[in-house]
Image (tube, rainbow, N blue to C red):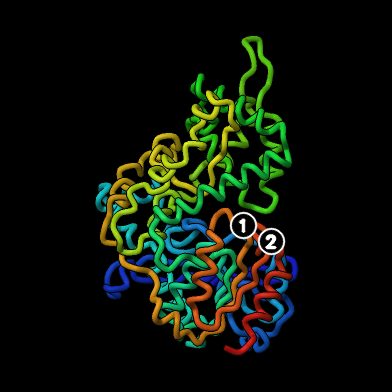
Amino acid sequence: MTTCRQPGVVVTDHHVPVPLDHARPEGEQIEVYGREITAAGLSDTERDRLPWLLYLEGGPGFGARRFIGRQAWIGRAVREFRVLLLDQRGTGRSTPANRQTLPLRGDAAAQAEYLTRFRADSIVRDCELVRRRLTGGAPWTVLGQSFGGFCAVHYLSTAPEGLARVLITGGLPSLDATADEVYTAAYPRIRRKNEAHFARYPRDAERVAAIAAHLLEHEVTLPGGGLLTVEAFQSLGILLGSGDGTHQLHHLLEGAFVPTPTGPVLADAFLEQVQAHLSYAGHPLYAVLHEAIYAQGRGPTDWAAERVRAGFPEFDAAGALAAGRPVLLTGETVHPWLFATDPALRPLRETAELLARRDDWTPLYDPERLAANRVPVAAAVYHDDMYVDTAHSLETAAAIRGLRTWVTDEFEHDGVRAGGPRVLDRLLALSRDEL
């Protein structure tokens, strides 16, 4: 273990070997990494008496964010917990899976087979091994943000004995919706976020239309070699689901063009910022496994977001321009063309295709066990969450015995970051009410 200090906290690294395939515990091992955060100034005895809180990051495909000191909710959490920020398998420092490492597995078929073991079911079994190693067998509190909440609901379905309580922020999944049903619900929400943005910043509708028209007529390459197609540009709408995303998007759009001797072109500064928002280099599993998180044993996902989008013609940029309608941006949707436009994903195109065709995914949730739940659970549900459907979340909340919800329009999907200590306080208070 390596320990260091940051302002107000002590940080300790943990590396834990886990089976690649939990059905074969003596087989190949991979490693998961967790970063323990405790308050500075505690004696060993005081620290050891604290209960553990496991944080599961949103995604899929993102390592746990690297807080500095007592940022965001960490300062509140370390007052009563030892906090473990876990890099879920394949992310961060946990045996990463990306275009550079996956060829070690073999061809695309071997890579796809390998990645079938990187869903919530394997993540939760990793958590249980880590828990037994760190807590001596004591149950811990789990805080799940977004996809981390999906993992927490799987945890409740399969290993509730490991849980003292569960806190979920923007991450109550449908227990039975297919990927098609998830995206059929998503596109109207995305449209509403566009309408709200253009109402706040009316000139941005003109700017978006101008950029889309330019991209339909010109091939534009990003500084890192990616292609900025009109569809890729539209995917900047993912910003509209976060608390300050509408303002970030506005600031980005207002500096899109610069004059040149041959006419207006997209500015280098604009393209650099766009690349930072659109590149999957730091989280390729988000694209490769995104639709698999909705696979519930009811056939292949088969690029659901792309297929469902065809039923919402208002998102077709060329059609909108021809009809004089606003060009709408998209949101948290993954499309097959990403594996042609993004250099970090191009080598994984065949692997992603095989995963999209896979039809033997196992269900992730156990409705009967959730209906008999005895673990205290509290969930923040955001009133018009762009990423996770509010109606789906409330249906799931009603299906989990004893779950208490806090439905709020004060935050967007990233409320645990924006609201920090206050969100954690509210969920802890709700979870302490008896079932």
Q: Is residue 229 left or right of residue 427?
A: left
Q: Is residue 289 visible?
A: no
In the image shown, does 230 or 56 lie closer to the viewer?
230
In the image shown, does 134 or 351 lie closer to the viewer?
351
Residue 147 is marked as: none
Please tell me how crowded label 2 is: few (under 14), some (14-19), or many (20+) other residues with Cα within 10 Å.
few
**Quadrant of the frame with the C terminus:** bottom right
Q: What amino acid type is highlighted by mark number 2?
A: Asp
Q: Is residue 28 visible?
A: yes
- Whether 229 is drawn above or below 128: the answer is above
- Whether 191 is drawn above or below 397: the answer is above
- Residue that numbered label 1 is attached to: 384
**Quadrant of the frame with the N terminus:** bottom right
* Numbered disc 1: secondary structure: loop
Q: Horizontal and vertical percent for residue 83?
A: 61, 74
Q: Horizontal and vertical percent for residue 199?
A: 71, 40
* Numbered disc 2: secondary structure: loop
Q: Residue furthest front?
A: 323
Q: Horizontal and vertical percent for residue 420?
A: 70, 66
Q: Residue at x 38, y 59 (%)?
A: 178
Q: Residue at x 68, y 76 (%)?
A: 78
Q: How far is mark 2 from mark 1, CA to CA?
A: 7 Å
Q: Horizontal and vertical percent for residue 429?
A: 68, 81
Cβ atoms under marks 2 and 1 closer than 8 Å: yes
- Residue that numbered label 2 is attached to: 409
Please tell me how crowded label 1 is: few (under 14), some (14-19), or many (20+) other residues with Cα within 10 Å.
many
Q: What amino acid type is highlighted by mark number 1?
A: Asp
Q: Residue at x 56, y 79 (%)?
A: 403
